[in-house]
């Protein structure tokens, strides 16, 4: 007995002789790996199907290799040019030959038309110069090529055009971000504001932010009393009333948009009621849809549940005795509300406003259907460039800017509210 | 006389006044409903309350009534409109006087007839024609096929990940959770654009698989959120107890974890289903005519040839969402019962 108590304490070991500490580290590491492995399939899936495509899109916003694809030899030669006057004869010879090759081969994405479109972004009106010259260039077989080119069209005698071509041969270009911010290169190659006619994107961004803020604010105004009512009613009644909030939440977006068209259009229900009551005449029907008003009304309706649900879940946790305590200490109802109740609802307000704002800022369907001309948001412009005008790089650049705004808001949401607080119903 | 009774009398007088001035039954009924509902829900306030307190309370309830009406009217109003005999989006004279000739099922018939080669045929020919060619029937088939596949994928992968995320040992939990939730936050246009380019490169654009994968991605956040929420109330010692009794990992999952988180899984699956069922942006970008879904068909319906058929489809969709909501409510109650929480 005495013997064992005097010896120095050995490190604790497990049955198989490994020190306990080491064994513990081992087993926690194994547990961590097991947890990680469970999430791994989904993480890989999301990375491949979601993050990678978006990354690729971001790349597209700075990368446009049309010019270097169509004019491979010219691309190398033009880099030597000092941007004064016209490029040297040998470089122009390469240009002409590259154009002839492109015209003959007509590979998808490598045609003269593609190049013409690319240069046309920077110098509006230059598209036809490329396509028409390309046709005539097919007959030019020997030099001097510079002269031949100038004979075809005098516009080639313009250093601005060649400088723009040289810039375009560089695969990576900030040009599309500049265009998305209403900037352009001037004749000397400096960055300046775009012509007023083309300044549409920055103002549209601001309009999107303004409309989203309006929608969020209206949602907050409408959601606050309703959530308060729901949180103070007995559970049975509030569950029943909750259906009125959840049913719209679960109903198809398109169904709700359709319903608003039926209600708001000039031959619709509200106008019929107004005419029936006699507030407006038969020819004085109010235009409430296919404009900003329509967008705001429909989007408030669609996003309102996203505001009510977080507000409600916060308000439910505020004991009613706090307000009673405040008024028993002499606070008027409004003071009690302002000093006691309102501050306690702030987490819910933060969660709701951020969520609604994030959702509103990227909305596409509703503005596209009921927005008309001036109710269009930035998402609609992005979709237009991807699907209609096919200026993919510009669409991608606009998308990246929108994504940046949303990610900042998402980060804020994570910071203030915490993503794990997100829940439905 | 209590202060509440005073209110009732004032309201009754006002209703009569409204009827006399407008001499219209519908306006009076509307007034009765809008302004009477809050009064109906008024309760006696504490004894020290003044008339002003009562009036303020009434105003508050009135405001809430208006907001609830705003929320629910658009969904209810399309139902009677879908039975309109005329191709209008508003109530006709006949509908308001409940003339039976003003109502019809023609738009519901049109759901089947639209796109059929010979709607007048009979027997098996009609059925196969309807199944193959009717536009709405085809898009319904597509919608269900895509939504079910996407739901299965999202629920399977999502539940697995949620199990990992809810473990105490999970490293980088915050980062991975934000990553998995992000498809819900990133604007759909951006997601759809990215997928459009990527899927075009790998040959998935304009295929069912492409749309299914896109919808799976969009449904995942909902599964993660609902299943982790269920797991947060999960007693982890049950797992150790099961292991202690000799169950292996799979048996523990099947016999202990799964039955307890099943309500969460099902509601997550329902969310994933409705997300896919209602999704139109990704379909617009990725799918071809072949993969048209109901929302896609509605989208072009609204844009191109707006007809009350859309209202009929919308009504069917609303009924579907009522059913889904009912199922979800039952599940919520079941979860509460399982956890021993009973409604107060």
Image (cartoon, rainbow, N blue to C red):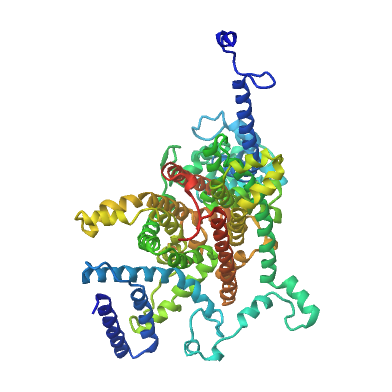
Q: Residue B147: where, in percent of width, then height? A: 65, 59
Q: Is residue B344 above or below residue B229?
A: below
- A270 sits to left or right of A41: left
| Residue pictured at 67% horizontal, 51% vertical | B153
Q: Residue A24: where, in percent of width, then height? A: 60, 25
Q: Is residue B308 above or below residue A62?
A: below
Q: Is residue B232 above or below residue A78?
A: below
Whether residue A200 is visible: no
Q: From the viewer's side, name the closer residue of B88 and B275.
A: B275
Which image quarter: residue A255? bottom right
Q: Quadrant location of the C terminus of chain B? A: bottom left
Q: From the viewer's side, name the closer residue of A59 and A416.
A: A416
| Residue pictured at 67% horizontal, 66% vertical | B139
Q: Quadrant location of the N terminus of chain B? A: bottom left
Q: From the viewer's side, name the closer residue of A23 and B186.
A: A23
Which image quarter: residue A269? bottom left
Q: Which residue sits furthest left?
A: A330
């Amino acid at each position: 007995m005495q013997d064992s108590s005097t010896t120095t304490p050995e490190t604790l070991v497990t049955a198989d002789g490994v020190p306990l500490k080491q064994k513990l580290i081992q087993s926690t590491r194994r547990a961590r790996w097991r947890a990680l492995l469970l999430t791994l399939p989904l993480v890989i899936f999301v990375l491949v199907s979601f993050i990678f495509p978006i990354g690729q899109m971001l790349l597209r916003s700075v990368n446009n290799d049309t010019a270097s694809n169509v004019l491979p030899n010219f691309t190398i030669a033009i880099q030597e040019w000092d941007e004064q006057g016209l490029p040297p004869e040998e470089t122009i010879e390469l240009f002409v030959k590259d154009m002839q090759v492109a015209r003959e081969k007509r590979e998808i994405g490598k045609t003269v038309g593609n190049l013409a479109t690319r240069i046309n972004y920077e110098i509006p009106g230059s598209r036809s110069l490329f396509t028409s010259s390309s046709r005539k260039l097919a007959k030019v077989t020997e030099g001097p090529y510079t002269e031949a080119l100038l004979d075809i069209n005098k516009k080639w005698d313009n250093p601005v055009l060649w400088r723009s071509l040289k810039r375009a041969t560089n695969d990576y270009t900030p040009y599309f971000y500049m265009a998305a911010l209403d900037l352009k290169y001037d004749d000397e190659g400096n960055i300046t504001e775009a012509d007023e006619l083309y300044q549409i994107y920055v103002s549209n961004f601001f309009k999107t932010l303004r409309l989203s803020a309006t929608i969020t604010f209206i949602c907050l105004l409408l959601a606050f009393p309703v959530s308060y009512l729901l949180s103070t009613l007995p559970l049975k009644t509030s569950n029943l009333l909750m259906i009125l909030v959840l049913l719209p939440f679960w109903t198809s977006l398109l169904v709700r948009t359709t319903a608003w068209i039926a209600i708001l259009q000039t031959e619709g229900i509200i106008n019929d009621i107004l005419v029936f009551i006699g507030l407006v005449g038969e020819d004085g029907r109010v235009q409430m849809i296919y404009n900003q008003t329509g967008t705001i009304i429909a989007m408030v309706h669609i996003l309102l549940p996203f505001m009510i649900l977080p507000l409600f879940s916060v308000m439910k946790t505020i004991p009613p005795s706090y307000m009673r305590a405040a008024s028993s200490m002499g606070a008027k109802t409004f003071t009690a509300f302002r000093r006691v109740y309102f501050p306690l609802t702030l987490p819910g307000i933060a969660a709701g406003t951020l969520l609604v704002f994030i959702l509103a800022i990227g909305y596409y369907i509703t503005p596209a259907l009921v927005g008309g001309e001036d109710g269009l948001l930035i998402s609609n412009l992005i979709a237009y460039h991807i699907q209609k005008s096919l200026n993919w790089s510009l669409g991608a650049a606009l998308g990246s800017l929108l994504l940046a705004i949303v990610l900042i808001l998402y980060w804020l949401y994570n910071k203030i509210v915490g993503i794990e607080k997100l829940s439905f119903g | 006389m209590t202060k509440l009774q005073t209110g009732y009398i004032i309201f009754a007088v006002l209703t009569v006044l409204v009827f006399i001035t407008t001499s219209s039954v519908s306006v009076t009924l509307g007034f009765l409903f809008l302004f009477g509902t809050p009064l109906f829900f008024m309760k006696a306030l504490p004894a020290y309350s003044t008339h002003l307190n009562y009036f303020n309370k009434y105003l508050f309830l009135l405001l809430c009534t208006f907001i609830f009406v705003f929320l629910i009217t658009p969904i209810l109003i399309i139902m009677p409109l879908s039975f309109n005999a005329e191709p209008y989006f508003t109530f006709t004279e006949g509908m308001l006087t409940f003339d039976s000739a003003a109502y019809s099922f023609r738009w519901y018939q049109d759901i089947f007839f639209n796109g059929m080669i010979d709607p007048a045929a009979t027997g098996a020919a009609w059925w196969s024609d309807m199944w193959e060619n009717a536009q709405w029937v085809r898009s319904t088939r597509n919608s269900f096929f895509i939504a079910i596949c996407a739901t299965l994928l999202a629920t399977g992968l999502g539940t697995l990940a949620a199990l990992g995320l809810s473990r105490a040992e999970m490293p980088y939990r915050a980062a991975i959770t934000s990553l998995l939730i992000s498809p819900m936050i990133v604007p759909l246009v951006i997601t759809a654009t990215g997928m459009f380019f990527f899927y075009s490169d790998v040959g998935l654009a304009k295929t069912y698989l492409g749309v299914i994968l896109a919808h799976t991605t969009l449904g995942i956040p909902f599964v993660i959120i609902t299943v982790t929420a269920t797991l947060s109330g999960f007693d982890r010692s049950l797992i150790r107890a099961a292991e202690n009794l000799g169950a292996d990992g799979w048996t523990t999952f099947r016999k202990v974890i799964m039955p307890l988180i099943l309500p969460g899984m099902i509601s997550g699956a329902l969310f994933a289903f409705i997300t896919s069922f209602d999704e139109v942006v990704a379909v617009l970008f990725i799918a071809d005519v072949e993969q048209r879904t109901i929302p896609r068909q509605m989208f072009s319906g609204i844009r191109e040839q707006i007809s009350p058929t859309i209202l009929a489809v919308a009504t069917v969709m609303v009924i579907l969402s009522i059913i889904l909501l009912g199922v979800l409510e039952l599940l919520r109650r079941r979860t509460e019962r399982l956890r021993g929480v009973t409604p107060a």
